[in-house]
Image (tube, grey):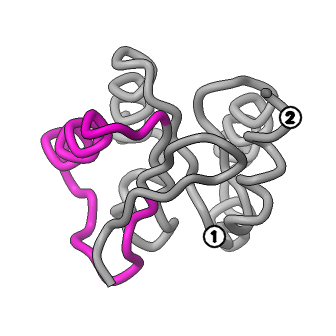
Amino acid sequence: MTDVLEQRAGVSVLVCDPAGPTVTTIQDALDLVGAAFLGAKAVAVPAGRLDESFYRLRTGFAGEVMQKFVNYNVRLAVIGDIAAHLASSSALRALVEESNRGRHVWFLPDLDALDARLAALA
């Protein structure tokens, strides 16, 4: 499977292939934003495609990636189980809780949860 543009809850979403390249640099994140400009309003990235440094907040990588998506007005949904990361970082837990209250960056268990979130915005 490759990254695919899908209509989900009436919103164009770039659904990223779990087997795709790992997002390890800001340029990798910008490449996803650029791919979204082909018609997507959101990007659903499997949690496993994000480099481990994303989940270690002291690196600053998560903040930089999230800021790129916000700056370009493209929603970012991190899809999948990140429980192991949450268990080892209260700061990450706080970031996830805060992000999930907003409208731009979400951490969700699966695409069904993304559909529900997008439908609630309509």
10 Å neighbourhood of mark 1: few (<14), some, or many (≥20)?
some
For the residue pair 91 and 114, the one nearer the viewer reads as: 114
Residue at the spot x=22%, y=71% of the render? Answer: 21
Horizontal side, residue 105 vs residue 33: left or right? right
Q: Earlier in the sequence, mark 1 or mark 2?
A: 1
Q: Which residue corresponds to mark 1?
A: 80
For the residue pair 82 and 2, the one nearer the viewer reads as: 2
Q: Which residue corresponds to mark 2?
A: 120
10 Å neighbourhood of mark 2: few (<14), some, or many (≥20)?
few
Residue at the spot x=67%, y=62% of the render? Answer: 88
Q: Return the mark for residue 53.
A: none
Horizontal side, residue 90 vs residue 78: left or right? right
Residue at the spot x=79%, y=28% of the render? Answer: 121
Residue 45 lies, in percent from the top left, at 46, 59
| Vertical position of residue 29 compared to residue 88: above or below | above
- Magenta stretch bounds: 15-41
| Vertical position of residue 105 compared to residue 90: above or below | above
* Location of residue 103 by image quarter: top right
In magenta segment, residue 48: no
